[in-house]
Amino acid sequence: MYQMNNKNSLLYEAEQLESQIFSIGRQLEIESDTVSGINSDLEIITDANETTRKTLYGKQEVVRSFFEVKTSETDEIISQASHSLVKLEKEIDHSVTIEYSESEYIRIEEEIRAIQERIDDIDGLLTDHRDKLEDFGSLIIDLDYSWFMGSELDLIVDNLEALERVVPWLENLRDRIELDKVSAVEAIKLFQELETEEEQKITELFSKESSAVEIFKETTNGRYSDLRYDIDSKTIIVERPTGETLDVSKLSKGTRDQLYLAIRVALGEKILEGSPGFFIMDDAFLSSDPNRLKSQVRLLEKLSKKGWQIIYFTIKNEVLETISKITENEVLTLTPLA
């Protein structure tokens, strides 16, 4: 019986507490009819109050800053701000009238927009300018200034001041390049003249009057009747009695040896103007077969009889035996160095 009464007492107290909660809720204008609903609404109110408190604090700080209020007490802030406003109001000249014009406002807005667009354009131009200045600075670094001027260009171009300083350096470099250009053009003309003269000499070396043609015909036993120098292709052309022409690169190794021997002899005769000279030959006939060897040795015999001095080095016994038949000079055997 006691236990039952105790439960009834607790139930009564709970009902009383719930009734108080609903009463507080109505005072707060909360319409929820459950304790959980009231609790949820209270949380919403609490959050809203916190947001309002932060907003008020922020505005309060703005007022403090604007009116230079030192205190942090809200009432004192309001009092000092009100006093400052009254002073400011007394300073206002109410005789001045400003008429509001919607069209003027729109015009000013358009001007501001145009100015902002111009600012954006200028920012873009400045960015392009910085990029170009950076690229120019890289070109300056890569410039081989010392090759022309003999000294390094120790300057980093990263601003307008540096750009102005580099101008006289580049002007000096330009003047030097122009001077070198003039010299180079004159040198090219000189080389071209020399090349023309040399080509003329080479052409004469292979002319009908040159001994090179006759020597080549003789050493090849008439298998080739003519040779000439082609200026355009800068190569030697040989001709057979049939009229067929061949580039020197198409000749066999033995025939090329005969050709080069004829050219050397003709060139020597031209330089010495017919006077006897001397040859030092290092196995010039190494690739020659017996017939070519005999014809080339006959040429050396003719030169020897004209007074030419000839030293011939060889490791080929056949060449040694063939040449020994046309000279009474002693054959010298050299000891290998290694």
Image (spheres, helix red, strand yellow):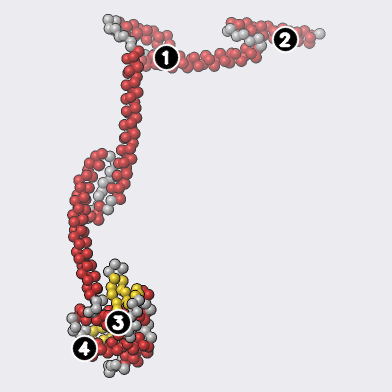
Decide: few, some or many residues near mark 3? Use Cα within 10 Å; few <14, some 14-19, many ≥20.
many
Question: In the rendered image, which residue does mark 4 sit on?
Answer: 307
Instruction: Residue 264: give x, y in percent of width and height.
Output: 27, 80
Residue 333 visible: no
Query: Which residue type carries mark 4?
Result: Gly
Say whether disc 1 or disc 3 marks the residue closer to the N-terminus.
Answer: 1
Of pointers 4 and 3, the one earlier in the residue sequence: 3
Image location of residue 313, percent across then percent down: 32, 85
Q: Which residue is mark 2?
A: 10
Sort mark 1 into few (<14), some (14-19) or many (20+) by Cα contacts within 10 Å: some
At label 3, the amino acid type is: Phe
Residue at x 22% of width, y 67% of height: 196
C-alpha span from label 3 to label 2: 142 Å
Q: Residue at x 20, y 46 (%)?
A: 168
Callout 2 secondary element: helix
Q: Residue at x 20, y 62 (%)?
A: 189
Which corner quadrant of the image does residue 182 belong to?
bottom left
What amino acid is found at the position of numbered circle 1 in the picture? Gln
The image shows residue 121, relative to residue 266, as above or below, that is above
Q: Is residue 252 rendered to the left or right of residue 183?
A: right
Q: Distance from label 4 to label 2 (Cα)?
A: 152 Å
Element under disc 1: helix
Place residue 193 in its image quadrant.
Answer: bottom left
Q: Which mark is residue 216?
A: 3
Residue at the disc numbered 1: 60
Residue at 40% from the left image edge and 9% from the top image edge: 78
C-alpha gap between disc 1 and disc 4: 124 Å
